[in-house]
Every structure is written in structure tokens, then in C-alpha cells.
Amino acid sequence: MNPRFHAAIGEAMSRLRTADVTGATAAVQRALAGREPMRRGDPDSGTQSGDGFETPSARGLRAILQKLRNERANFVPTPSHGDAIAEEARDSENFRARRFQSAVGSVAYKLYLPSDHADRELALVMMLHGCTQNPDDFARGTRMNALAEEFGLIVAYPLQPKSANAQGCWNWFDARHQERGAGEPAVLAGLAQELASEFKIDRKRVFVAGLSAGGAMADVLSSAYPDVFSAVGIHSGLPHGAACDVMSAFAAMKGNGKAAAKGRSPIRKIIFHGGADARVHPSNGKRVFDLARSAHGEPPEFQTDTVINGKRVTRSLLGHGQDPAIAEHWLIHGGGHAWSGGDHLGSYVDATGPDASREMIRFFLEA
């Protein structure tokens, strides 16, 4: 878009917000004429435009705005980086908006179907975004849709509306949303069950993963619905039961959470956490791992230390012999509060370090 035209229209919109119809009309006329926007302090910002003619009435403004709409093709901007992201976020044949409704509630979600889903054995992954995120942003940052094509995954991205939480966070810390049969866990589990039925997916191939508040809710689901989900991925999250209200949630995020005995879930878990996470203390990831150990009778632990994409990573595993690991804990030294190895076009992403999405899928499918 022509910068001068853009500035003039911006001035017009600003004046309309303060009921300055006369000034807005003059700004639109200057935009159409290709002249500079007028500063508020200019002496000719009143009843007469800088072009030497009297400003028309509100009816004239409506006519000019209609002209702008009719001629908007002349001012179509060159696609920008942001426009490309917005275009990608729109529904497509493979990625569509849907809604699930049940007796306990409803949830809007985006669903990704791999191109050849009718000819493959499928798995389902439910992805729970973090605070301030949405399904399109989370899909972009985690690159999970690309893995869906590679591994034959159906990926569901539920949306937490602002009406449920002002920051768009899953209410993992609220006692009303921590138990089976009610609240957000019941709705999310119901969605997973409906999709598994619709696409004929075996329960052993139904998984859930999340980031931050989404990771915490994923752990709630692992405890409340172990009959629905067979494995869980928790990135920068907290253990089920670490908090019961807003104040205890802040304490838990600082690493001073409750004992979280509710987090002793029998299902397999893979945990990622940045060692320098200033939003959710890394001790929370370790706590999830320790609870997984106690839930399985203290199995042996194996640990490796390596460098992946320039980041030092300590990887701990629980298991027996050649069997798939019961739990994995990836501590990314120096990592912050961000999805590891994702796409920088998404929010809360660290493009360096291990690829958390790929490692989660590997962990989910190897059992």
C-alpha cells in the first residue's frame, strides 16, 4: 500500500474515533488525491481542507468511503510476511475449523487431516496451546501438521476462548477443571473419543500434548482419562494437582507447588523443559518425571548428556531392558519458555535445540 495513502487513511480512522467527521472527510480526500496527511496541529485542520475547498458533510464522507471501497483494487498492498501467515491460517482442504458439543460443554477446534488419511493406519494427537496462543499459531510453531503428513496423524487443536480465561489459558489450576467427568477435561476427552470413533483410531494410538498451560492440562488429562489417552507430551508444563487456585498457580509456576499426588498417572509421558525457563520453573518438569517414576514402582533410570543443534541436553529415561521407555525427561540447558525446535513464525518457539514435536511423535508411536 502507498505509505502516504496508508498514513492518510490512518489519520481518517483516528479522527472518526473522536467523532471528528469533518477532519476524517478531509483526510480521506487527501488520500484520494495522493497528498500528505495533515497533522493535528496544522492551522487548516478545521472546516477547510489544505486543498483549498470546503470539507463536505457526513453524507459526502459516506460517498467518499463508498468510492474508496469501489476503487480499493487500486490500493491492494503487496503481500507481506504477515499476510503470508494470515493466508496460511485460513481453512484449507486439510486444515478446517470444527466444533465439538457434548452434555458437559463444547469447544471449537481446528483439525488437520493428512492428504492420504483414507489409506493409512491413523493416530490422533490432540495439541493444547499455551496462553495467548490459538490453534493456527500453535500449529505453525510446532510444525505438527508436517509430521501429520509424514506419520499419518490426525491432529486436533482445541481453542480456549477468552470467555473461559482472559489470557486464553486452559484452567489447569482450577479445581473445577481437574477431575474426571466435568469441566475442560471432560470436554477435551469427549472430543478425543469422538474423533477416534469418527476415524476408527485405536485407543492405543490416541495422544495429547501441550505447551505451558496446555502442557499442564495435558497432564490433567493423563490422570483423569488414562482410558482415553495412551501417552502424553508435556512441554514447559506443570504436574496435575500442583495448584488449586490462582494464587497457588503462581506459586507452582515459581517452583513452589503442592505435592501434586494427583500427577501419578499410569500412562507414558515425555517431558520437555528449558533449564532457564523464567515463566514456569524447570523443577515442574522434573516433578512430572518423578511422579511418573513413582506411578510405575520406581523403575530404573538411564541418563545421557549430549549437544543437539548447539544446545546441551540432559535426557533421562525410565524403563526396563528393551521395552519402550515409560517416561522421558528432556532438560534443555539454557532453554527458555518456548517450544523446542519449532518454527520461529509461531509464538513461544525456540527454533534451536532438539525437535520436540518429532521426539514426541517418536515416543508416542514406538510403544
Image (cartoon, grey):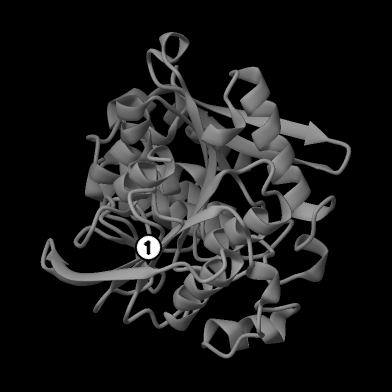
Question: In the picture shown, does residue 346 fall above or below 65?
Answer: below
Which quadrant would the C terminus be assigned to in this image? Answer: top left
Q: Position of residue 214 (x, y in %)?
A: 55, 58
Name the residue located 26 percent from the left edge and 53 percent from the top edge: 355
Question: In the picture shown, does residue 20 fall above or below 117?
Answer: below
Name the residue located 82 percent from the left edge and 43 percent from the top edge: 105
* 228 sits to left or right of 316: right
* 213 sits to left or right of 260: left
Give the number of marks. 1
Name the residue located 25 percent from the left edge and 50 percent from the top edge: 4
Furthest residue in direction right, as rendered: 103
- In which quarter of the view is residue 152 placed? top left
- Asked which secondary structure carries label 1, the reply is loop
Depth check: 22 or 142 in front?
A: 142
Q: Position of residue 351 (x, y in %)?
A: 22, 58
What residue is disc 1 on? Answer: 348
State whether residue 30 appears in this view: no
Q: Residues within 10 Å of mark 1 (few under 14, many from 20)?
A: many
State whether residue 275 appears in this view: yes
Which quadrant would the N terminus be assigned to in this image? Answer: top left
Depth check: 54 or 63 in front?
A: 63
Q: Position of residue 255 (x, y in %)?
A: 52, 87
- In which quarter of the view is residue 90 placed? top left
Furthest residue in direction top, as rendered: 119
Depth check: 153 or 228 in front?
A: 228
Depth check: 224 or 85 in front?
A: 224
Q: Amino acid at mark 1?
A: Tyr
Q: Position of residue 68 (x, y in %)?
A: 43, 31
* 67 sits to left or right of 3: right
Question: In the picture shown, does residue 283 fall above or below 330?
Answer: below
